[in-house]
Image (cartoon, coloured by chain):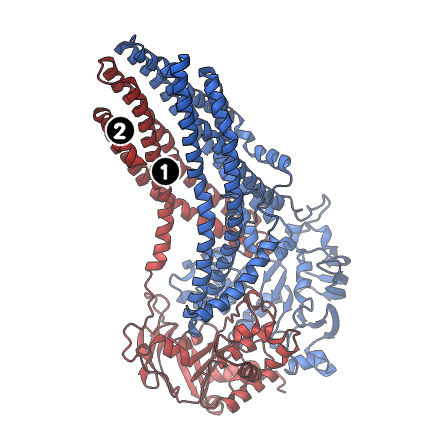
Amino acid sequence: MLIGAVIMAFVKNAQLAMVILFIIPFLIVIIVIVIKIAFPRFQILQEKIDKLNATVREAVTNIRVIKSFVRGDHEQEKFENANSDLKESSLRAFRVMITTMPLMGLAMNVTTLAVVWFGGKQILVGDMPIGDLTAFTTYVVQILIALMMSSFIVLQSSRAIASARRINEIIDCKPDITDDDAKCPEATVERGEIEFKDVTFRYYKNSEDPVLDKISFKINAGETVGIIGSTGSGKTTLVSMIPRLYDPDEGSVYVDGIDVKDYSLYNLRESVSMVLQKNVLFSGSIMENLKWGDEEATEEEIRKVAGMAQADGFVSSFPEGYEMDLGQGGVNVSGGQKQRLCIARALLKKPKILILDDSTSAVDTATEALIRKNFKEFCPETTKIIIAQRITSVIEADKIIVIDDGKIVGIGNHAELMKNCEAYEEIYLSQMDKEVVS
Amino acid sequence: MDAKTFERLDLKYKKKNEEYMKAHANDMMRHGPGGGRGPAGKVGKPKNTKESIGRLFSYIKKDTWKIVIVLLLVVVSSLTNLAGTYVLRPVMNSLTDGTGTVAILAKGLGVMALLYATGIIAQYAYQRIMIGVSQGALERIRNDLFKKVGRLPLKYYDTNDTGDIMSRFTNDVDTVGNMLNNTVVSIISGVISLVGTLFLMFYTNWILALVTIVMAPVMVKAAGAVAKKSRKYYKQQQAALGSLNGYVEETISGQKVVKVFNHERAAGDEFDYLNADLRNKQLKAQFFGGIMGPVMGNLGQMSYTIVSVVGGLLCVLRGFDIGGLTIFAGYSRQFSRPINELSMQVTEIFSALAGAERVFDAMDTPPELPDSDEALAPENLRGEIILDNVTFGYVPEKTILKNVSFYAKPGQKIALVGSTGAGKTTITNLITRFYDIDEGSISIDGIDIRHLKRDYLRQNIAMVLQDTHLFSGTVRENIRYGRLDATDEEVVEAAKLASAHSFIMRLENGYDTMLEGDGANLSQGQRQLLNIARAAISKAPILILDEATSSVDTRTERHIEHGMDRLMKTRTTIVIAHRLSTVRNANAIIVLENGEIIERGDHDDLLQQKGRYYELYTGKKELD
C-alpha cells in the first residue's frame, strides 16, 4: 500500500511528491533517535522489574523468618526502594516513548500543510487542477499512515529487542561441559572401574582454598565404596565428576582406564546412575517416573527394581498402584518413599556405576539395610558408591573414603580406619558412643 | 520426534487441556485480544466494578488537579485537530472558485499550523503528566499491597502459592497500569473526537453524514464477530502457555536429574511438542486478532468510496463545495478510528478491573488481628513456657493437636519427637502466634501470649527452621538479620558459635560474599549453619530449633554441639529433630503421635519404657 501510494503520488505530481521524500528521512531520524535513547532505558527497566520480583519472591518465601525476627519494616523499606527505582526507570523509559506520538503527528501535519501550500500555489498559477490536489492529499495521508504504522512497529520492537538480548544471552551461553573433543566417542563403560588422579576443584577460579585438593584414589569394578566426611567437605562435588556434572580444574577422572572427557556424554551417563542428594520426581505417575531409567522397561522389570529399592511394598498399597499421580515435585509421597523411588529409578538404568548421594537419609535403618543387602545380591558387578551421614550406611563397604576439608584423610575398611584414622573414629564415636545399636 | 513419542505426548496433554478449558469456561468471557496476560494471572470478570473503580481513583486523588489539567489538554488537542482540518474547507474553496490568492492560502495554512501545533503540544503535555500520575499511583498501589500482604497471617501464605501472590504484584498491577496510562485519556479523546467529528460531518453535509452513519453498525457487527472468534483461541492459547511454563519450571529445577538420566532428548521432545502446540494455538489467536485491522480497514475504504461517490454526485447536482467534500472525506476516514479505539478500551478496562480486584482482594484479606490496647510488653522475659490443654486445627474439621500440655522452665531444653504430621511444627507455629489456638492456653512467664504485643513476643523468640531461608545480600547482612544493631565482631562471634566461620572464610569474599537467590551457592548444611548463626546473634530468651541441623553431618554437629550448648544454656529451647541423637540431652522429650502426647520423659526414662521412642531410637520404625 505504501509503495503503491508513493508511485501514484509521483505519477500524479512529481514536484509535490518530493515533499514525501523530505518527510521520510525526517521520520527515520526520529525513530533512530528514539530507539537509541529508549533501548538502554528499557533494558534498565527490565532489570528493575526483575529486581522487584526477586524482592517480592524473597519476602513471600521467607515470610516465617521475617515475621519471627519482626523485620517487616526492614523488608518494607527494601521493597519501597526497589519499587521507587522501578518507577523512576519506567518514567525514564516511557518519557521517551511518549514523544513519538506527537512527533509523528507533527510530521503528518507538516506534510499536509506543505502539500496544500505547494499544491495551492500551483493551482493559483494554473499548473494543476483542484481534483489533483484532493487526490494527492488522500495519497499523502495514506502514505503517512503506512509510515506511522511501520514506525510504531519498529519502536515497539525496541522493547522486544531488549528482551531478545536477554534470551540470546542464554542461548549464546556455551556449555562448558561438552563432548566435542572426546577421543573415543564410541566407547562405552564395560566394567565400572574408577580412578581419580590429582583432582583439584574450585568453585571460584580465584579462591585460595580449593574445594577438592589433589584427590587420588582407585575403585575396582564391582566394589562397594563409602564416602564419608563433614558438611561442605566436597563429597557431592567429588562424585559429580564421574558422570561429568562438573569437570576437575586440574587432574583427571578415569573410568575403565579412559578419561571421562573422552567418552561421549551420552555413553558415559548411560552407564552411570546417580541418585542425587536433592531428589527430584516429576509430575506424572510413578510408572512414568520410574521409566526415566529405561523407556522400554516392562512392568515386571519395574516391579523388580522397585522391590530391590524396597518401594514395591508401599507402591502396591496405593489404590492406583504404579499409576498413582505423584503431583508436581512428587508431593504425594513422603520423604523416605521419595528416596526409595529415586533409587528404583536409578537401578532401572542397569548402570555399571551406581552413586547414592546421601539418598537414604529419610529411610529407617532397618529398611536401608535391606536395600543394601539387595544391592549385594542382585547387582554384584555394579560399582557402588555410597555417600552417607550415618556410619551404619557405609560400615560394611569394601572401602571407605574419609574426606575432610577437600582432602582424603583416610582410605580403608572399617576396621582399618578405626585404627588409623582419627577423623573416622571421631565420626564413629559421634554416632555410636551413646547410642544403643540394634 | 518420532510418531510414537508424539502420540504419547498428544494423549497426555489433550486430556490436560480439556480440563483446563472446562475449568476456565466462564473466564475471559468478555476478553478479547490482550485479555489474558501471563499464565498465572487468572483473568475473570470483575465483580464489584463500582467499588474497584472508586478505590482506583483514590490512588490518583492526590493528583486531582493534574488530572483536571490532563482532561483540559485532551479536550484542547482533540478540538484543535478537528478544527485544523476544518480550516482546509475555505482554503480549498477559495482555490476552486478563483478568488484565491497566495495571501489567503498563507493565512489559512498559518491558522492550520497554529492549531496543529497547539494540539501537538497539548498532546505531549498530557501524556507526560499522565505518565507521572499513573506511575506514581502504581508505586503507591504496590507499596500498599506489599505492606498489607506482609501483615497477612501465615495461613494466607500456607494456602496460596507463591506464584499466585507474585502474579498480583506483576500481572495484575500491570494491567491496572495499562489502564491508568492509556484508557482514561483514550476514552475521553475518543468520545470528543467521535462527537466532534459527527457534529462537523453533519454541519458540513447532513446527507453525506447520514450515509456514513449507516455504515457504522456494519463495522461494529464485523468487529464483534471477529472478536468472538479470537476470544476462543486466546483461551486455548492461555492453556497451552500454562502447560509450557509448568514444564519449563519443572525441568529446569530438576536439571541435574535430566542430565544424569540422559534425558535431554526426551525433555527436548516434550518441550518441542508443547512449544508447537502453543505456536499453533497462538497462530490462530493472533490471526483472528490480526485480521481485525484489515477487516476494519477495508470496511473503512468501502465507506470512503461510498462517501466519495455520493459526495461527488452532490457536488455536481446540489452545489456541495469541493472544500467541504475534501474535509468530509477526511472526517469519514477518522470516524471509524474512535469507534475501534473505544471498543478496544472496553476490553482493556475489563481486564484492568479484574486485575485491580485481585490486588484489592489480597489487600482486603483480614490481617493478623491488631494488638489490643492492653497488650503487654514486660521487660526482660525469662522464657518460661507453659502449654495448657492446647487444642488446635488449621481447619475446623480437622484437629491437629489434642489437649497438649507441657511446661518448660527458663533455660530448659524440650524436645519434640514424632512422625511427619504429628503436630510438632504446629506447636512452634502456636508459640510464635503464627496461628492462634482454639482451646487451652499458652503462656510465657505466666502471661497468656494473647495478651502480649505480637511483635514483642516474636522479638523474644529466635527460630531456626528446616527450610533454610537466606536473603540476597552478603553473608554478614544475613547473620545480622537476627539483630540489626549487632557489631561486626558480634557477627563473627555468632558465626564461630555456629561453626560457620571456617567455611565463610573459604568463600570468595569471606563475610562480604554476596548470596544470590536464597543462597544457592552454599550447601544445604552450610545454609543451616548460617541460620543458626542468625539465631545466635539475637538475644531472644526463647529458641526454637525446627530440624535445625538435619542437613549438617553428625561430626560437624558434634563440633557445633559445644556452641549450641552455649546458645541453649541461657535460653529456653524447643527442639524438633528427626535425628534422635540430637535430642538425647534434652530435659524432657515429648513424643507426639496424631496430635497427642503419647510419651514423655528424659532419654533414659523413655528407653526404659520400651515404647514408641525406643522403637524409633533403635531404628525399628521409620520416622515419616
Residue to which mark 2 is pinned: A9
Q: In the rendered view, tell whether residue B109 sits above or below residue A305.
A: above
Give the colour of chain B: blue
- How far apart are the two marked residues, 1 and 2, measured between alpha carbons? 23 Å
Task: Give coordinates of residue B11: x percent, y percent.
Answer: 53, 66
Which marked residue is nearer to the observer: mark 1 or mark 2? Answer: 2
Task: Give coordinates of residue B449: x percent, y percent.
Answer: 71, 54
Q: In the rendered view, tell whether residue A129 sits above or below residue B471.
A: above
Q: In the rendered view, tell whether residue B310 sits above or below residue B425.
A: above
User: Are the residues at dot 1 and dot 2 in contact (C-beta closer than 8 Å)?
Assistant: no
How would you rate the neighbour count of disc 2 (Cα within 10 Å): few for under 14, some for 14-19, many for 20 or more?
Answer: many
Q: Secondary structure at mark 1?
A: helix
Q: Secondary structure at mark 2?
A: helix
Task: Give coordinates of residue B245: x percent, y percent.
Answer: 49, 57
Question: Which is more toward the observer, A181 or A304?
Answer: A304
The circle drawn on residue A152 is: 1
Q: In the rendered view, tell whether residue B338 sits above or below residue A57.
A: above
Task: Give coordinates of residue B10: x percent, y percent.
Answer: 50, 64
Question: Which is more toward the observer, A436 or B193?
Answer: B193
Image quadrant where one finds the N terminus of chain B: bottom left
The chain to which mark 1 is attached is A
Amino acid at circle 1: Phe
Horizontal arrangement in the rendering, residue A200 relative to residue B163 (left or right): left
Question: Which is more toward the observer, B584 or A323?
Answer: A323
Amino acid at circle 2: Ala
> Where, by quadrant of the figure, is residue A87 drawn?
top left
Give the colour of chain A: red
